[in-house]
Image (spheres, rainbow, N blue to C red):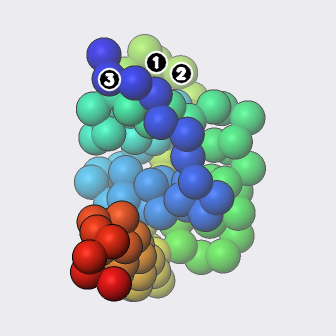
Amino acid sequence: MPDQAELLPGTLDLLILKAVSLGRLHGYGVLLRIEQISGGALQVKQGALYPALYRLEHQGFIASEWGTSHNNRRAKYYRLTSAGRKRLGEQTARWNRLAEAIGRSLAVRPQEI
């Protein structure tokens, strides 16, 4: 299993939007999907996940409805809204620009300055 990585501030919402964009999920399913798509490198604590889901729903980026989970329990399922899809695209582009700039900065050698 790869080393665990610490989530940077502001990345949890982006990861939730990405996870939900891949299909309708209940809360715990979102947590598992993030772990899955990160190859096990990112694990989200439930204490951070549920307030973030509430916040994203309140902002209109995700919507929820009650359903029945695979183990026959009542669960709240989340899906991405059109505003959430737009937000995911914007935040993904922003993240990619930042990661590219940091990568370039870290690759500079003294003779290149």
Q: Amino acid at mark 3?
A: Pro
User: In terms of secondary structure, where does tag 1 sit?
Assistant: loop
**Nearer the observer, disc 3 or disc 2?**
3
Res 2 label: 3
Q: Amino acid at mark 1?
A: Asn
> Which image quadrant for residue 81?
bottom left
For the residues labelled 1 and 2, say whether their Cβ atoms are less than 8 Å apart.
yes
Q: Residues within 10 Å of mark 1 (few under 14, many from 20)?
A: few
User: In terms of secondary structure, where does tag 3 sit?
Assistant: loop
105 or 9, nearer to the observer:
105
**Nearer the observer, disc 1 or disc 3?**
3
Residue extending furthest toward the front: 111
> Which residue is found at the position 53% from the left and 59% from the top?
11
In 3D space, how far apart are the residues under numbered discs 1 and 2 (Cα atoms)?
4 Å
Please determine whether, in this image, residue 82 is positioned above or below residue 19: below
> Which residue is found at the position 47% from the left and 63% from the top?
14
Whether residue 45 is visible: yes
Q: What residue is disc 2 on?
A: 73
Q: Which numbered disc, 1 or 3, marks the residue that appears first in the sequence?
A: 3
Query: Horizontal and vertical percent for residue 85?
Result: 37, 77
Res 72 label: 1
Q: Residues within 10 Å of mark 2 (few under 14, many from 20)?
A: few
Query: Horizontal and vertical percent for residue 2?
Result: 32, 23
Query: Horizontal and vertical percent for residue 41?
Result: 38, 32
User: In terms of secondary structure, where does tag 2 sit?
Assistant: loop
Which quadrant would the N terminus be assigned to in this image?
Answer: top left
